[in-house]
Structure formats: structure tokens, C-alpha cells
Image (cartoon, rainbow, N blue to C red):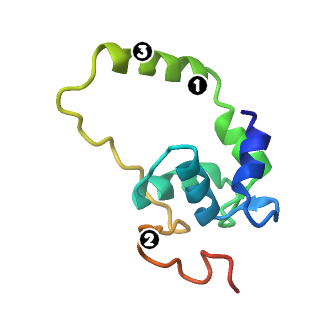
Amino acid sequence: MREADAFAMFDANRDGNLSPEELYEGLKYVGLRMTPAELRDLIVLFDTDQNGSISLDEFKAALSVPGLDDDLALNHDLALNHPPSNPEPGPSLPVPPHATVMPTPAEPLPPHAAGVS
């Protein structure tokens, strides 16, 4: 799937930007479940202009990491051949002041995160 196709599928309200909720739901739809902290870290990486939403250009840039496909294939092969016996959580990224913690799916989103003014 091309980045633009994934972006269009995730952009539920068709405003040309992904809100935190749209990113979460889109990733969940394709089988990637994340904790609120993981989602926050991902948004910090994607949202380079720090406006609270992810544009198509930001989305494409974040997914266009040289060698990413090779690293993912290698990691997939390693995981199949040598699954970890005691997986440990990875390091947490520092959280910049503009980042917000996303609620768990059981919690309602605050109005500003859900796109309500």
C-alpha cells in the first residue's frame, strides 16, 4: 500500500490531516495496536511542524526512512528464527511540551483531540 493510500484511508473526516484519533484508529484497522504512550511518541515523530495533526507530507516523510523495509524484513526474520524469551519494553522517548497523552480507547477523547471546537 502506498503512503498516500494509507493516509486517505486513515483520514476519516477528509480534511487532509490526520488527528491523533484518526491515526490511532487507522493503525488499529491495519492491525497495529499501540498504547497511549506509544501513540504519543509516534505523533511526536510524525508531526514535525507541531500543529497537533499530521499532513500527507509529514506522513510520507515519516514512512520514507531509507533502509526501513530492509530493517523490517531483517527484524521479522530474526523474530521468526529467534523469538525473545523475556521481551523487555523498549526505551521511552522524551516527551516535548507540545505532546499530549492519548487516552485509552475506553476513555472519551477531549473535545480538542476529537476535532470538536
Numbered disc 3: secondary structure: helix
Up/down of 3 relative to 113, above or below? above
Specify the amino acid type for callout 3. Asp
Front residue of 38/31: it is 31
Q: Do tag 3 and tag 1 residues touch (Cβ < 8 Å)?
A: no
The residue lying at 36 percent from left, 49 percent from top is 92
Mark 2, Cα crowd under 10 Å, few <14 / some 14-19 / many 20+, is some
Q: Quadrant of the C terminus?
A: bottom right
Precedes in sequence: disc 3 or disc 1: 1
Locate residue 55 relative to residue 90 in the image: left or right: right
Q: Position of residue 15 (x, y in %)?
A: 82, 65
- Residue for badge 1: 68
The residue lying at 65 percent from left, 66 percent from top is 52
- Residues under labels 2 and 3: Cα distance? 33 Å
Front residue of 100/104: it is 104
Precedes in sequence: disc 1 or disc 2: 1
Up/down of 100 relative to 37, above or below? below
Residue 2: numbered disc? none
Specify the amino acid type for callout 2. Pro
Mark 3, Cα crowd under 10 Å, few <14 / some 14-19 / many 20+, is few
Specify the amino acid type for callout 1. Leu
Mark 1, Cα crowd under 10 Å, few <14 / some 14-19 / many 20+, is few
- Residues under labels 3 and 1: Cα distance? 14 Å
Q: Position of residue 3 (x, y in %)?
A: 74, 38
Between marks 1 and 2 in the image, the one whose residue lies nearer the viewer: 2
Q: Do tag 2 and tag 3 residues touch (Cβ < 8 Å)?
A: no
Numbered disc 2: secondary structure: loop
- Residue for badge 3: 77
- Residue for badge 2: 103
